[in-house]
Amino acid sequence: MPVIYSLFLGFLLGYLGQRARLCFIGGMRDYVLVRDTYLIKGLFGFFFGALLGFILFNIISIASLKTFPWFINGAGVFLKKWKTMGILANPSFILPVPGDPITWSPNVFYHLLLAFIGGTIVGFVSVLAGGCPFRQHVMAAEGSYSALSYIIGFATGAVVFHKLLVPIIKTLLR
Amino acid sequence: MRWTAARVGFLIGFGAAVGQALFKIIPPPAYGVCIACHVRDLVNWIIFKISPNFYGKFVGAPVSAKFPLLTIIGVMIGAFLAANINKEFQFKTMRVWWQNPLIEFFWGMFVAIGALMMGGCPIRTILKAAYLDITAMFGLVSIFIGVVLGCIVIKRLVKLT
């Protein structure tokens, strides 16, 4: 069931994103270079749409949204598990939503450092490459050769990260 | 009705929340739409089927362990159909020298590594910030800092050529 819905949502995202030229980092780049606000309204629309959806489904109390305000309810789920093992995380409301089950640790400063380094790399290199990853996938479907080579590099980068970089990060910051 | 970027963003954001609430895309939370994470799930699932000893165990989100989420295939099919229906399909390369296909391979690799360090691609960072996660808001600020630095470099590069 989640597989079919994700295929449908991806189809909608690809079709409408090609018609409307949607790009999230392009919005920030257009605002910084020429003060154009067409694309950054897409960013804010996404934020408010997701926030409205989460609040609505939390109010009618769907069970899979019981960790909704993450800094109040969600991080506590992990704190209880660690307290039985004797590990304490402080301050606890800054723990991130787990994106990668390997680099999860109770040290809060470690997560903030990784977020800062990763975010700066993504912003800097995406502006040089011409768009966010979503926009490059849409441009590859429009027939651009540069974007096709970007996609191959993207998949290679995911494999390189999990094979080579994760042991290095875990030993450097332990 | 005319699809501007703000309306598309609103619809897809609401659709990601619907996906978590009604269609059980749940462990991990806030996972409805993400480009980097779903590409990683698809590639790792294929590698795990071909040779299970490459990583030792399945590396990816628990919701993709049996069958991976197919968001990225839907995106490419949808964009291909939209380009063909409106006759905007054309084989082309970019016009500036730092966006030729050989260098773009390395840009793609660096963006994938940075995005997986941060915990998601830019779309998922905004979704996590709507889920009220403070580390994700910090990540959004650092993406903005990176974009400002990149714009300074682009202005210098355009002046050189």
Image (cartoon, coloured by chain):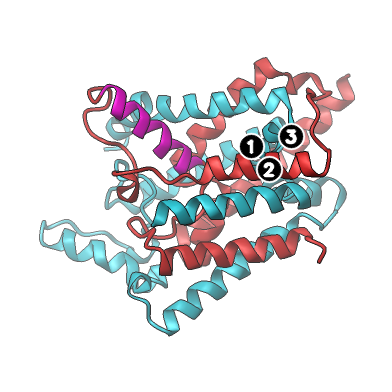
Q: Amino acid at mark 2?
A: Ala
Residue B127 at what x, y percent from top left? 53, 59
Q: Residues within 10 Å of mark 2 (few under 14, many from 20)?
A: many
Chain painted red = B
Residue ID for mark 1: A137
Query: Measuring 40% from the left and 72% from the top, which residue is drawn there?
Result: A68
- Residue B15, above or below B122: below
Residue ID for mark 3: A142
Q: Secondary structure at mark 1?
A: helix
Q: Secondary structure at mark 2?
A: helix
Left or right position of A128 against B46: right
The magenta region covers: B36-51
Name chain A's colour: cyan
Residue B47 at what x, y percent from top left? 34, 26
Q: Quadrant of residue B87?
A: top right
Residue A157 at what x, y percent from top left? 48, 27
* Mark nearer the N terminus (1 vs 3): 1
Residue B158 at what x, y percent from top left? 86, 26
Q: Answer whether residue B37 is magenta in the image.
A: yes
Q: Residues within 10 Å of mark 1 (few under 14, many from 20)?
A: many
